[in-house]
Image: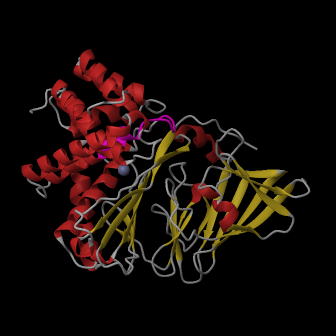
Amino acid sequence: MVTQTVKGGLWMRFERVVIFLAPLLRRGARPAILALAALAVAAMTLGSLASDRARPADIRVTVEQLGDGALRITYDLKKRRRALLFGELATGHRARRWKVETPGFKLARLYDGDRISRTDGAKFDRIVIVASPDVIRIQKNYQPIARYGESGVMIYNGHFWPVTARGGRVNTVFSFIPASGAKAVAFGARTADRLTNWRSPLAHPAFVYMGPLEPVETREVMAVVDAAAPQWIIDEFYALTPRVFAHLAEALDFSLAVKPNLFLAAPLGREEGRLSYSGDALPAQFQITLEGGAWRAPSPKALGIFRRSTIHEAVHLWQAAARPGSDDVAGWIHEGAADAIAAETLVALGLWDREAYAADFDRARDECAGELRDGPLATAAARGRFRALYACGHVIAAAVSWAEGETVSDFWKGFIAAAKTSDGYDEGDFYDFVAKRSGDREFVAALRYFVRTPLANPEREVGRLLAAAGAPS
Ligand SMILES: [Zn+2]
């Protein structure tokens, strides 16, 4: 069994914006953003797996699409072994949603994953399971299987990809066999209706779609769009992405190496006043799920959320060129920057005026201060205060760029260029880059203090940080 050491990671995320429009609001509440995001990390670098490509796989995984979102998954092992290990997922998900078809096996939950072995402890070379989608959305992680449009399913293969005892990925190839009349789509690979002995071109877990939808290839993306999505959303998406991609390529000074996949699902449901946008980004892939009846007709609110969130996900595609080095890297670094660069992009494209930009920044600033009342940014994710990563990250992204008198996009152009040659950046690299760029050690000390210290008066400290950056007050 070939093992790889874990050298770097990449954020995984479940980000979500939910807004209830005025007609459904009760008790006179203001429209509330119930947003939730989480970070965890997949673990591998392009380099650590590149050598695997030349070697025959140790495990072949065949994924067959059954009805109702279920999958039959067969693991064929080149060499017999005693167990298959799987990485961390929502506690008990596999025990609840995976059924081992092959007799004589058991699934044991580990503190950081699951282990499947024979009940008699003997070695084996083949096992078949049937996996079903969860009935509730798994928080803080990708959905292993999600129903995607009529008769379609979206798979995140990382949750089905065996790991080594040291947390690397076993050298594995996947075959995806869709139901009759359906096709499998991942990246640009759709020359046949199925994918056979497939490895992600990015040597990283990926989304794979199986279903009847015909992918649409544009100059910028290979898109798989739910036929149930409202036409105005589809039109907006195809109008927006070329402009956003062109702008980001120029602002960040490089084009994407791989044409990305965009998956858009719209299980709108019946809640009329609801607008829910969830997005996930992977290297060269992002997926959007729209829920709530308020998406059916265009409205300024719906259009605003769609544009802003879609640009945020697009920024992640560029940020992926410089990966966080481990799962401990602070999410506010990339989440806040994605929000800040999205805001700059909206202005650059003429979709926001200066007032809209200023109002958005003020909102981030207020939200950040509110989020820091119970503890510092450094512990926000651990405390479940995920909005702090976005709002305070946005404030910091603006502050570090203003300290140098430049835009957030300018700052990130430099940061990506510096970080992509490394094995993956960490929080220290971020501070070092700020120090090098601004030449201002006092500002970096103020920034570290802001991130790490419990703040008695967060409003005042946000103001001080921005003043230290030389922001116009
Ligand atoms: Zn994000």
Q: Image height check: is 336 above or below 97? A: above
Choose between 241 and 291: the one closer to the eye.
291
Residue at 26 percent of width and 34 percent of height:
458
Q: Is residue 92 magenta?
A: no
Choose between 358 and 347: the one closer to the eye.
358
Residue at 67 percent of width and 61 percent of height:
94
Residue at the far bottom in the pictured view = 181
User: In which quadrant of the rendered view does residue 411 lie?
Assistant: top left
The x, y position of residue 318, in whole percent, is 34, 46
Tell me the magenta residue range. Answer: 325-338
Q: Please identify the quadrant where the C terminus is shown.
A: top left
The x, y position of residue 258, in whole percent, is 40, 52
Residue at 43 percent of width and 77 percent of height:
214
Asked whether the viewer can see residue 337, the reply is no
Residue at 39 percent of width and 59 percent of height:
279
Question: With 185 as the anchor, is 278 left or right in this view?
Answer: left
Q: Image height check: is 68 above or below 242? A: below
Asked whether the viewer can see residue 445, the reply is yes
The x, y position of residue 111, in whole percent, is 68, 46
Question: With 202 as the anchor, is 101 left or right in this view?
Answer: right
Q: Image height check: is 29 above or below 255? A: below
The x, y position of residue 298, in whole percent, is 20, 75
Q: Image height check: is 390 above or below 466? A: below
Choose between 424 and 280: the one closer to the eye.
280
Q: Is residue 334 magenta?
A: yes
Q: Please identify the quadrant where the N terminus is shown.
A: top right
